Image (cartoon, grey):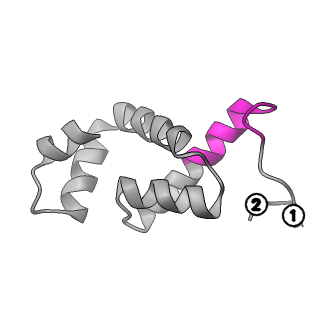
Amino acid sequence: MMYHYGHRRRPPCLRCHPHGYIRMVQHLIERCLLLQMSRNQCLKALAKHARVHPLVTLTVWRELQKENRDFFQAYFHSISPSQTQAGVLERC
């Protein structure tokens, strides 16, 4: 749940506040990364718990990956060292 100055508030609406919604999804993805979740686990978790459409999560994930390629290479290697970095990145 999101809080603002100690009070509950509704998450931003994709249609009404697209920038805020995208930032919220980015923040939620970052939390998934802290929990060492895979991309698919993150997609499912955000769909179930935050009601974020998987296509939105996937789009934000891909943009984050483009901007932070080195981080994601290291991240994928750390959560699944048996897979090659190139193979994982190609599927993303």
Q: In the picture, which quadrant includes the C terminus?
A: top left
Q: At which x and y percent is residue 64?
A: 43, 38
**Residue 87: in magenta span:** no
Residue in the picture at 20% in, 37% down: 90
Mark 2: give few (<14), some (14-19) or many (20+) Cα within 10 Å. few
**On the picture, is 4 further left or further right than 49?**
right
State the mark number for residue 79: none
Q: At which x and y percent is residue 30?
A: 49, 54
State the mark number for residue 2: 2
- SS for dot 1: strand
Assess whether mark 2 and mark 1 are in contact (beta carbons under 8 angstroms): yes
**On the picture, is 23 further left or further right than 65?**
right
Q: At which x and y percent is residue 12?
A: 77, 44
In the rendered image, the vertical position of residue 6 relative to residue 92, given as above or below? below
Q: What stretch of residues is rendered in magenta?
A: 13-26
Residue in the picture at 76% in, 31% down: 15
Residue in the picture at 55% in, 39% down: 56
Most frequent secondary structure within the magenta stretch = helix
- SS for dot 2: loop
Q: Which residue is mark 1?
A: 8
Which amino acid is tagged 2? Met
Which amino acid is tagged 1? Arg
Q: Earlier in the sequence, mark 1 or mark 2?
A: 2
Please tell me which residue lies in front, 52 or 84: 52
**Residue 19: in magenta span:** yes
Q: At which x and y percent is residue 21?
A: 69, 40
Q: In the picture, which quadrant includes the N terminus?
A: bottom right
Q: Name the image quarter holding residue 8.
A: bottom right
Mark 1: give few (<14), some (14-19) or many (20+) Cα within 10 Å. few
Q: Name the image quarter holding residue 18.
A: top right
Residue in the picture at 65% in, 58% down: 50
Please tell me which residue lies in front, 50 or 31: 50
